[in-house]
Amino acid sequence: MTAPYRILDHLREGTPLSADEVRQVAAGAADGSWTDAQLGAFLMGVTLRGLDTASTGALTGAMVDSGERWDLRSEFPGVVDKHSTGGVADGVSLLLAPLLAACGVPVVMLTGRGLGHTGGTTDKLESIPGFSLDLDRDDCRRLLAEHGAAVGMPTGEIAPADGRLYALRDATATIRSLPLITASILSKKLATGAEALVFDVKAGNGAFLTEREEARELARGLVDTCTSLGHRAAALITDMSQPLGEWCGHTAEVRAALEGLEGRGAADLVEVTLELGAQVCALAGHAVDRAALEAAIASGAARQKFDDWAAAQGADPAWLAAPDLTLAPEEAVIEAPRAGVLAWVDTRQLGLLLAEAGGGRVAGRAIDHGVSLRYRGRLGQPLAAGDELARLYLRRADDALVRRVAACFEIADTADPPPLIYERVE
């Protein structure tokens, strides 16, 4: 066994770490034999020096091995998973899980809470009264067997090495390291044992990785690392230079999901959902294509599957019978100040302002699920003076916040809309 000092010395010198050395780091994070100072030095070294593909794979595998491995594909062949790197109004998971299940494709997702300007799938689902995401392996097995879908939060037994490293990354300014991001995401995803995974990697000012080249590098790292560890994977790089769909906010995004499952959802939200769904079905070998997914929406099967699955995860039957999607009562309209074209949206700032208004995760304060924004414009869209750009739903009037939201929109004489999907990484 190599001493922590020697491993850190190799990293400092730029000497490639062996797979065994990387595994020792993950084991030391899980069992406490590495101190916070040593792990912090490792994280900074990786951030500055990087890790090659083999070392990233070794770190990921060791982090998976530090806790429970559920190996669900041994019981549910073809089980799939999806992960998004996050954005504003990114409610794809709420549509995709019941849609895939309605087509006979088993899907398991371990989701997270909101972080910074983004909303988390966990928080959105918890806006449904009674919905529980505290699932262990037996719960997931039961849900997959009975309903074809299971969505929960990682348990404390899943990848404990990542839990410790993630907390230190926040404290040591090493959050943006791509090898560390890759290992953190996959250590939880691969622990469930999905047959195939599809990644929605966002690019644009509302994404964590704003530049397309950086998003492409992360997508490639995720796909290559998955493949090296025996899981099929692909990624879409999608636009996050404006909110996805029309609704931002927890209850509002549940509304958007139900609208999508009922065949009346926002075109861009539905398009990304269908493309991700068709991609992961092909990866896992299911005879389910985009047309089959569209048919499940048109027939009502996807909407019914949402109700059956949500009820199985504890959703209040009275809410499911008549969903209460009431938004915060104070409305404020953001209008175009002049004629022209919507040229730019500060999407990250919109997410931060919604959180500030109560609609996001802020320490010491509960999320107000009703605080929302309806995004009415589209980049490249011609506008007349006074056209509605957005509508805010607040708990109380706040003129200063409304002005700050209005400042997130820029009108110009001309502008081209961005593509919804930039590229595919397979």
Image: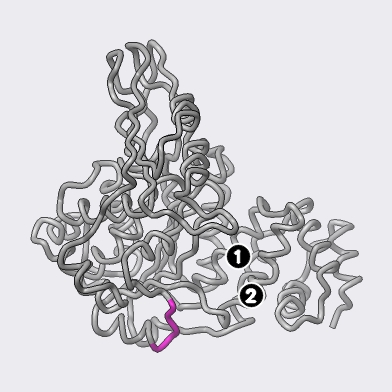
Instruction: Please state the horizontal and vertical placement of residue 106, each as a whole percent of the image.
Output: 30, 74
Q: Position of residue 174 (x, y in %)?
A: 72, 54
**How many numbered markers are drawn?**
2
Work out whether 401 lies above or below 104.
Answer: above
Residue bearing the label numbered 2 = 63
- Residue drawn at point x = 39 percent, y = 81 percent: 73
Residue 340 left/right relative to 186: left
Near-viewer residue (222 or 28): 28
Asked if the residues shown at circle 2 and circle 1 are in contact, with their CB atoms under 8 angstroms apart, the answer is yes
Q: Disc 1 marks which residue? A: 184
Q: Quadrant of residue 109?
A: bottom left
In the image as oriented, which residue stretches furthest toward the left? 299
Q: Position of residue 79 (x, y in %)?
A: 35, 75
State the scheme by which the image is colored.
one colour
Is residue 426 visible in the rendered image? The answer is no
Residue 66, numbered circle = none
Residue occupying the point 28% across, 58% down: 95
Residue 20 or 96: which is nearer the viewer? 96
* Among the two numbered marks 2 and 1 on one chain, the one whose residue lies closer to the N terminus: 2
Is 69 in the magenta? no
Q: In whole angstroms, how far apart are the C-alphas of marks 2 and 1?
A: 8 Å
Q: Secondary structure at mark 1?
A: helix
Nearest the viewer among 63 and 225 is 63
Q: Give the image quarter of residue 257.
A: bottom left
Q: Residue at x 44, y 40 (%)?
A: 240
Where's residue 222, x and y in %? 53, 59
The quarter of the picture where the C terminus appears is bottom left
Q: Which residues are magenta?
A: 134-138
| Three-letter residue code for mark 1 | Ser
